[in-house]
Image (spheres, grey):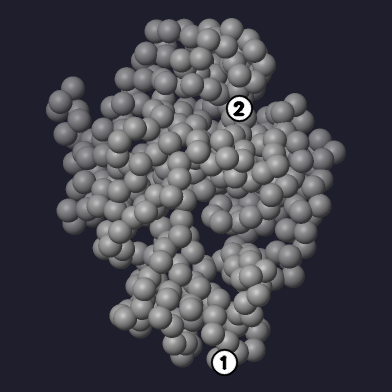
């Protein structure tokens, strides 16, 4: 058997779990002697692509929503007779496209609500204390904001300034903060330290010793400001709080990041400073996936106006509930936004205008993604989609 993973942390987690079942896997990764005699191999994708492939009649792909990448496809081509089993909580690519080009069948073993009821997951308390408007930002690459746009968003002080204050009020326990880029993560780390709260830093370019030290601090109850690391598959049951400071249009990335704190025993808290919950719905919403479509099919807890934010504790919950499940406050049909560090009420008229703007922007995004799939260059696709929308209006 060959087990594939793309991150060091996932590789070591898989090897540890296999050992708990009395298996002794070989590791294919830098700095570890090869063990070709081992019947089970746990391999780093980046390392295996440069080595002689071990024999396997079963290939397990961890976080298989990444398996459309060229490196994965090249490795899988080495095993035409093997059974390929993909594992993921989000069976679609980060750009929203399905995985039907790689896999033949999709088996959805359980819905999040079932896993919560059975005690396998913890329902997080989602709070949106300082949602900022991103209506002027365009999605122009692989279904999500480009690094340049994320860097521009990170310059807005409201994405940094109130993170420590709201964590002091609502956060608890080991915490991961997802930032837009390295500079942004460092700024958030410094903001925590200014408030007398020790915080660590982690990115994908750090050496193994530095990464291990950062993760040890998290495991001991600390706060870790991360850049594109720990978003997928990282398993730390005591992780209590996730702070979202990275806007995303990717449902896959959103579910992966919020899912990091949903391991038992809980309680779990998500502090959403960028409004991702209003784009994608609550983390525990039931979703029905397809191999052939970019969209989930069937019933799904809608995003946007189907969610309400409590004006007392800022918890986000389904709009049909008469009161906030977190603090018990009666629901008021208004949302709040942050301006200059203050929480202000938004009128129903403003809310309706914002909903119209968001719907128009999303229709442009959908049309642009269609054009990109048809072969258009991303820049041209967005220009055509915008022009078409202006003509309709």
Say which residue label 2 marks: 127
Q: Residue at x 58, y 26 (%)?
A: 128
Q: Are marks 2 and 1 in contact (CB under 8 Å)?
A: no
Toward the right, the furthest residue is 196
Q: Which mark lies nearer to you, 2 or 1?
A: 1
Q: Within the image, what quadrant is residue 195 found in?
A: top right
Q: Is residue 105 left or right of residue 243?
A: left
> Looking at the rendered structure, which numbered label has been put on residue 37?
1
Q: Residue at x 60, y 90 (%)?
A: 35
Pick the front one: 298 or 118: 118
User: Badge 1, how many Cα within 10 Å: few under 14, some, many 20+?
Assistant: few
Q: Is residue 211 above or below residue 339?
A: below
Provide the secondary structure element on which disc 1 rests. loop
Tell me the quadrant of the picture where the C terminus can be found: top left
> Looking at the rendered structure, which numbered label has been put on residue 212?
none
Q: Is residue 86 above or below residue 29?
A: above
Q: Position of residue 363 (x, y in %)?
A: 26, 33
Q: Position of residue 155 (x, y in %)?
A: 57, 39
- Mark 2 and mark 1 lie on one chain; the one further toward the N terminus is 1
Q: Residue at x 82, y 40 (%)?
A: 197
Pick the front one: 337 or 306: 306
Pick the front one: 294 or 223: 294
Q: Within the image, what quadrant is residue 325 found in?
A: top right
Q: Residue at x 64, y 12 (%)?
A: 328
Q: Position of residue 15 (x, y in %)?
A: 62, 72
Q: Is residue 390 left or right of residue 40?
A: left
């Amino acid at each position: 058997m060959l087990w594939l993973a793309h991150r060091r942390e996932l590789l070591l987690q898989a090897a540890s779990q296999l050992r708990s079942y009395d298996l002794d896997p070989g590791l294919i990764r830098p700095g570890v002697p090869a063990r070709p005699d081992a019947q089970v191999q746990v391999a780093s994708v980046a390392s295996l692509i440069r080595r002689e492939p071990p024999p396997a009649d079963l290939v397990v792909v961890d976080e298989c929503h990444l398996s459309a990448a060229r490196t994965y496809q090249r490795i899988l081509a080495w095993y035409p007779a093997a059974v390929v089993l993909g594992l993921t909580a989000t069976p679609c690519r980060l750009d929203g496209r399905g995985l039907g080009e790689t896999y033949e069948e999709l088996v959805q073993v359980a819905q999040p609500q079932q896993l919560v009821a059975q005690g396998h997951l913890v329902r997080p308390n989602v709070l949106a204390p300082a949602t900022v408007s991103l209506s002027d930002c365009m999605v122009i690459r692989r279904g999500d904001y480009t690094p340049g746009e994320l860097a521009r968003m990170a310059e807005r002080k409201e994405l940094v300034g109130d993170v420590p204050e709201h964590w002091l009020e609502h956060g608890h326990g080991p915490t991961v903060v997802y930032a837009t880029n390295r500079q942004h993560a460092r700024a958030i780390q410094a903001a925590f330290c200014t408030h007398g709260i020790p915080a660590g830093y982690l990115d994908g370019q750090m050496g193994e010793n530095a990464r291990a030290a950062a993760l040890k601090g998290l495991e001991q109850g600390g706060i870790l400001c991360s850049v594109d690391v720990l978003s997928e598959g990282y398993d730390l049951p005591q992780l209590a709080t996730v702070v979202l400071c990275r806007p995303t249009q990717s449902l896959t990335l959103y579910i992966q990041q919020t899912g990091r704190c949903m391991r038992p025993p809980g309680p779990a808290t998500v502090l959403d400073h960028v409004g991702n919950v209003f784009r994608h719905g609550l983390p525990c919403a039931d979703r029905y996936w397809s191999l052939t479509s970019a969209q989930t099919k069937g019933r799904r807890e809608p995003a946007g106006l189907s969610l309400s934010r409590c004006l007392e504790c800022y918890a986000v919950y389904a709009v049909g509930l008469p009161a906030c499940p977190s603090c018990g406050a009666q629901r008021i049909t208004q949302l709040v936004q942050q301006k200059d560090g203050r929480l202000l009420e938004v009128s129903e008229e403003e809310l309706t205008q914002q909903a119209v703007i968001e719907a128009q922007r999303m229709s442009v995004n959908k049309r642009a993604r269609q054009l990109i799939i048809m072969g258009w260059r991303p820049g041209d696709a967005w220009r055509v989609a915008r022009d078409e929308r202006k003509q309709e209006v």
